[in-house]
Image (spheres, helix red, strand yellow):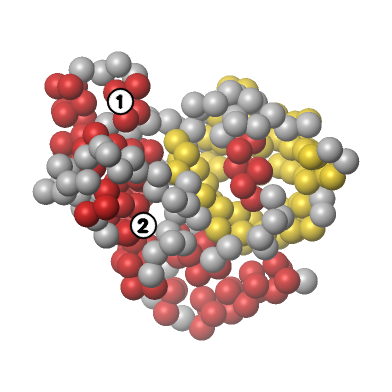
Amino acid sequence: MNDVLVLDNISHAFGQQPIFDNLSMSVSKNDVVSIVGASGVGKTTLFNIAAGLLVPSSGKVFINGKETTGEAGTVGYMLQKDLLLPFKSVYDNIALPLTLKGYSKAKIADIINPQLASFGLEGLEHQYPQMLSGGQRQRAALLRTYLSDNPIMLLDEPFSALDFVTKDEMYHWFSKLQKRLELTCLIITHDIDEAIYLSDQLYVLKGSPAEFTQTFSIPKCEGFLDSQDYLNLKKQIFAAIQS
């Protein structure tokens, strides 16, 4: 079985308000899957269930074939805000998951230092978060998430706080990094362009209770992002969210 994450018939309600009813999806190894939907449809709630931070009313979560429903610490989780600690250097922020595991300073250095260049942070590791650009802060947060060494990374609106130019640069950078490191990722976003650019597959979440109404496979051929086919796909996804 090649599925890293499986959500199996997930239902959930807050009080008398049903949020999901029998949602199922999977993320295969080395794939990037996005969930798009309008604000308030339950994307973050579903993420919290996948991350083990919230126990669903019914249904199960599996990671690499093992049930992890309600078990925190089984995924790397990066929120929209980078949550870098302002009183710690970039290096010490990145090192947090390794420090919490009790690794020695020497072992932490052996793990972090080879990664700094790949994440565009070489020479910045001794600065503090407030000295970095938005893109640099997001790369530091992403490296910290990566070093949690979990089989899948959940990214919650990872680039939404960035300006248009920085966001476009981050898309290019992240796509190359994902392929090189063979990352498996689940992303939630309201940005259709972001979802198309970064993903292999896209799920549309809508309704009350919410369900996956459509699934789209994203072509990865050369020139697709500059083609009429890209614009047509974007219109289809938009229509699926709005309909």
Q: Amino acid at mark 1?
A: Leu
Q: Position of residue 76 (x, y in %)?
A: 45, 36
Q: Nearer the viewer, residue 174 or 108?
A: 108
What residue is rendered at 71% in x and 55% in y?
Answer: 41
Left or right for 68, reference 120? right
Q: Nearer the viewer, residue 61 or 159?
A: 159
Residue at the left extreme, as displayed: 123
Left or right for 212, reference 187? right
Picture layout, residue 166 above or below residue 110: below
Discs 2, 1 touching: Cβ within 8 Å: no
What residue is rendered at 29% in x and 23% in y?
Answer: 99
What residue is rendered at 78% in x and 31% in y?
Answer: 57
Question: Is residue 29 shown to the viewer in this render?
Answer: no
Dot 2 alpha-carbon crowd within 10 angstroms: few under 14, some 14 to 19, many 20 or more: some
Q: Amino acid at mark 2?
A: Ser
Left or right for 9, reference 36? right
Residue at the bottom extreme, as displayed: 228
What label does residue 98 carry, if any? 1
Picture layout, residue 203 above or below residue 101: below
Q: Secondary structure at mark 1?
A: helix
Residue located beneath label 2 in the image: 175
Q: Secondary structure at mark 2?
A: helix
Question: Is residue 175 shown to the viewer in this render?
Answer: yes
Q: Position of residue 234 (x, y in %)?
A: 58, 74
Quadrant location of the C terminus? bottom right
CA separation, marks 2 and 1?
25 Å
